Image (spheres, coloured by chain):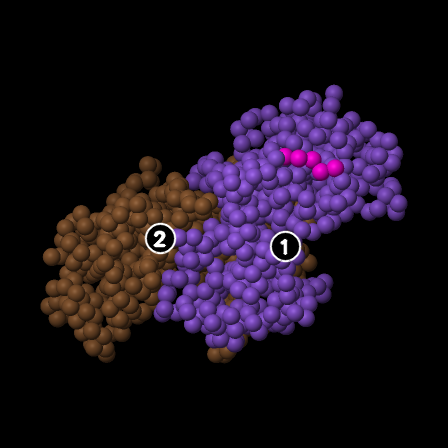
Chain colours: A purple, B brown
Amino acid sequence: MKKLIVGQSGGPTSVINGTLAGVYYGAKKQGYDKVYGMVNGIEGLLDERIIDLDDYFKDKNNLELLKRTPSSFLQTCRYKLESIEEHEEIYEKIFKILDKNSIDSFIYIGGNDSMDTIESLSDYALLKHKKQNFIGVPKTIDNDLPITDHCPGFGSACKYIATSIREIIQDNNCYGVTKPTVAIVEIMGRHAGWLTASSALCKDESCAGVDAIFLPEYPFDVKKFVKDIEELLKKKPSIVIAVSEGLKTTDNQYVCELTDSNLLVDSFGHKELTGCANVLCNILKTKLGVKTRPIIFSTLQRSAAHMASKTDLEEAYKCGLKGAELAYKGKSGKMVIMTRISDKPYKIKYDVFNDIHKIANVEKKIPLEWIDMKNNYVKQELIDYMRPLIQGEVKPIIKNGLPAHITLKK
Amino acid sequence: MKKLIVGQSGGPTSVINGTLAGVYYGAKKQGYDKVYGMVNGIEGLLDERIIDLDDYFKDKNNLELLKRTPSSFLQTCRYKLESIEEHEEIYEKIFKILDKNSIDSFIYIGGNDSMDTIESLSDYALLKHKKQNFIGVPKTIDNDLPITDHCPGFGSACKYIATSIREIIQDNNCYGVTKPTVAIVEIMGRHAGWLTASSALCKDESCAGVDAIFLPEYPFDVKKFVKDIEELLKKKPSIVIAVSEGLKTTDNQYVCELTDSNLLVDSFGHKELTGCANVLCNILKTKLGVKTRPIIFSTLQRSAAHMASKTDLEEAYKCGLKGAELAYKGKSGKMVIMTRISDKPYKIKYDVFNDIHKIANVEKKIPLEWIDMKNNYVKQELIDYMRPLIQGEVKPIIKNGLPAHITLKK
């Protein structure tokens, strides 16, 4: 009897369940007799919240539903394992639970922090001669994992963002010259601007595109911003710009913390930020007297499975398959990566990266040579890099007029 | 030579261009030789901003693109005609422009305010024995026009809202018991709660649905709200609620004006509201110490053509056809309406309503007997009324991985 357990960790995406589907199907195909899921990742595993995935996915229709269900089916956690030296008891507990359930392999689907978990557990297994092996499979809408060409989840978020911004551009233009309006769209990605940059995908013969893109990779100059928008307004009445939630000023201060009136203190005394887009809208209203509209995609950008990219979903699924294959081969402390072997036609190879220490906790930002700071835009190279990732649509399974999902039983 | 001019007015929708497509195609089919568009509605007409729609839509492919393009292709205005008694010169100017361009018929696609324009112009034509006739065709995401069963634009907004809230529910649940979270989704409709109520469509076997719905049709009791959410949190960790942007307290104060820290004053001294969802999130954080997340759909709910309802788009188109038919027959001061002649199967009749005075400036709210105030929800009758309106999907025309649109040439 070979047994595998799989978990999801960190922020969810539209296609992280596509990877789960790949792990489940791949593990079964490889020869695992049981595929378990840990609920709420490593945090739930510590409470032995383990389910048998056969209960859900023996039925192939449910596997198709799973691929189209956003967010983490197994639920998630943000749980950072302490170091082995300082908290060996946690490791002992985890391996006791794995042993008790006769688990051979452990797959974790996640981002940088989750790869840290894989690193620590595989190190511990090596140190203590444990039989279990540990494989990481990447996911993140932020696309900030190094080594892999890109991350599953990123393409679908790009497709949703670019589609929605196109619609916002149409909407924002509706009053034309009769009412100049600046819409500021705030996009996730606190340190890396990949998602914000995807707004550049809008532009083609049927859409004028966004008028400016502000990324967290370089300091945000408030005075230049106001001047640049003022110049844009002289040329056209409808301005739509994309900003990262994590913009920082030249004084290294978060833009979202700039105005006192935007700071709300909660019952625990924590400052709560109302968002970069709100602050920038207020600045433009005050300085230019123009009508503004902040639009914050919030969790929609990571969960809009109804607008998922087919390319992204297929890649997410195949990363899951690859993870199951590596696990069955007994590899440990490794991560599945995608290598782009051709641009035209776009072609990806599913690979294994041997040294997870080089991935865990490392953030990949946009290379500065792909950014056009002077014109508040991105270079064609970056657009060419992203374009293949949003190709193809995933037809939702519609019931009662709405996309159907699958959820954990109570 | 028979000539018709068409305009769009008020807030845009995902399918208002479907109605424009219907007017164009219908007018040509009826026998009009020319179909003009006024850019920015009556406001643009006063500046003689008139275009020949043949330049765009002789090509049938463009007509299909038009149906899938959100917002007002002809752009819009919020321009209220002064009364005939006080400002006859405006009427004289409008009719001079219509005469100069040999226009016989005038169709206005819009909501309550736009029907006021049709009312005034048709009254004036009658009074002054002018040859032109005036027809109104309804649109509004708010669904607040009386007489007609519902308005084109409403169904697609419902479909987008219900789809997105399903995805938000999945996302909000991702931390499960490890981090209880309340997401508050703010939905358009300042006085009428139809759109907010559409959140109830989420609930079925694949989705637990929203946990509470707060409508502007009755006073919002802040204390009861906090208590009800507290009770909900005892039962489950993930709470998603839908609120109307226009909620007012029992003291008749807008909820979005409740906290001073949410009031920002712009350069003209206008108070700007940061939104009802933000205020309610702050209240819950302060009173219950729970993690909250405001999500504001903003203009996405009225422009997400990629998730339009096929039923809605077809109805919007047919309302346009009907408008052209009425115009050609020489009717004036009338509005196209939809009458529901059967629920199962759902069947609509396209009709004419003769007395536009009964429609202009009247707001239709949700009947109180369709609201379950005690349980912060809506009754089944309201769900049954809305369900047929979200049926069917419209396949976008995809280019470069994104839905393609058509826009006015510069």
Residue A367 is marked as 1
Q: Secondary structure at mark 2?
A: loop
Occupied quadrant, residue B188: bottom left
Residue A235, image x and y in percent? 41, 69
- How far apart are the alpha carbons under marks 2 and 1? 34 Å
Relative height, residue B28 to residue B358 (above, below)? above
Amino acid tagged 1:
Pro
Whether A90 is among the magenta residues is: no
Quadrant of residue B341 in the image?
top left
Nearest to the observer: residue B301 or residue B99: B99
B268 is higher (above) or lower (below) than A29: below
> Is B149 placed left or right of A209 in the picture?
left
Residue at 11% of width from left, 57% of height from top? B1
Question: Mark 2 and 1 residues: CB-CB less than 8 Å, in contact?
Answer: no
Which quarter of the figure is the N terminus of chain A placed in? top right
What is the total number of numbered labels drawn onto the structure image? 2
**Where is residue A185 drawn, in percent x and y?**
52, 60
Front residue (pair A11, A190): A190
Instruction: Name the residue at 52% across, 57% down.
Output: B296
Disc 2 crowd, CA 10 A, few/some/many (<14, 14-19, 20+)? many
Compared with B322, B362 (above or below) is: below
Which chain letter goes with mark 2? Answer: B
Pinpoint residue A303: horizontal percent, then vertical percent: 56, 46
Q: Which residue is mark 2?
A: B406
Tell me which amino acid carries mark 2.
Ile
Q: Would residue A351 be counted in the magenta stretch? A: yes
Q: Residue at x 27, y 46 (%)?
A: B60
Tell me residue B73's x, y (percent).
33, 57
Which segment is the magenta one? A350-354
Residue B63 visible in the displayed image? yes
